[in-house]
Amino acid sequence: MSPVLSISAVTKTYKSGQTALHAIDLAVEKGEIFALLGPNGAGKTTLISIICGLVSMTSGRISVDGHDIITDYRAARGIIGLVPQEISLDIFATVENTVQFSRGLFGKSANPAYIEQILRDLSLWEKRGARVNELSGGMKRRVMIAKALSHEPDILFLDEPTAGVDVNLRRDMWDLVRRLRDRGVTVILTTHYLEEAEEMADRVGVIDRGRLVLVEETATLMRKMGKRRLSVTMQQRMTAIPPALSGWPLRLEADGERLVYEFDANAPDTGMPLLLRELAAAGIDYKDLETGRSSLEDIFVGLVESGV
Ligand SMILES: Nc1ncnc2c1ncn2[C@@H]1O[C@H](COP(=O)(O)OP(=O)(O)OP(=O)(O)O)[C@@H](O)[C@H]1O
């Protein structure tokens, strides 16, 4: 099977001299959900913008379903839908008109049944006659997605779809992405949230300072990187970790108010109970305990340190 998106040796140097992408190679198969993970400034938006024709690449080649994005721009752009990070909508248009108009821009003839389906999928059907400026921020985001889907694209790009979005909308978006995939749409999303990638993606690409440092099946990545953290908020601030605890890989955070212990979630013995006993023995009182998954930043540190 030939990939629906093929990126080869793509480099981008902005006029400022900043090189945002270094020789990126990537192939995405039809019907995949692919998550591009990376910290702020890693180059995710630049890569998506290049594929969608909003930013020009300095060198390299990209083809979308066999269409070169430069020499065959129209055909390539026609099969791509893009939901950018920032909401940009005509606030005086109605929801339905916004979506129909966007479809028209791609030269597609009207298809009321399809438009109804996407508005229903996004819980926008009841609001179809409302003007965009009457909608909440979450609803506006849904309209952005409906707009991106208006011309029946084969590939949908979602640039940080759930940044600043509430839990319900996040769940709805995840459901929608799965339904799209079931219909054969390829979805490429960028995110800072490992949880989102884990929940959604078949494969994950990690981008760091303009380099694609890793491309992996999500399940494999999670197994390799599945670290958890225990945060202990203490009654008293500490200036340094007491010598009695020097054998533990602990970090002081929040101006000495919090001790953080990272451990392998897959290990048979996490060490957590013993650590808590040793804290008590060292006379350290705490007011709160919290466990959670390591943040992406922590995982990056792990990646860089392990020299992947
Ligand atoms: N128009 C531009 N001109 C010059 N430099 C730019 C431009 N756009 C982005 N950059 C730089 O390119 C690098 C990559 O930025 P990009 O927006 O692609 O990162 P990102 O991974 O999408 O980040 P975020 O997660 O914050 O959205 C950054 O160093 C950024 O400052």
Image: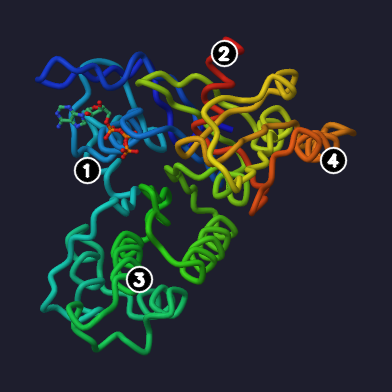
Q: Nearer the viewer, mark 1 or mark 4?
A: 4
Q: Nearer the viewer, mark 2 or mark 4?
A: 4
Marks 3/1: CA–CA distance: 31 Å
- Tell me how the rendering is colored: rainbow
Determine whether the residue tagged by mark 1 lies in a helix, strand or loop. Answer: helix
Residue furthest to the front: 283
Mark carried by residue 198: none
Q: Is residue 95 above or below residue 189?
A: below
**Amino acid type shown at disc 1:** Arg
**Amino acid type shown at disc 3:** Gly
Marks 2/1: CA–CA distance: 43 Å
Q: Nearer the viewer, mark 4 or mark 3?
A: 4
Q: Which residue is mark 4?
A: 273
Badge 3 vs badge 2, beta-carbon distance below 8 Å: no
Task: Name the residue located 24 percent from the left edge and 34 percent from the top edge.
Answer: 72
Q: Which residue is mark 2?
A: 305
Marks 4/3: CA–CA distance: 42 Å
Image quarter in which the C terminus is found: top right
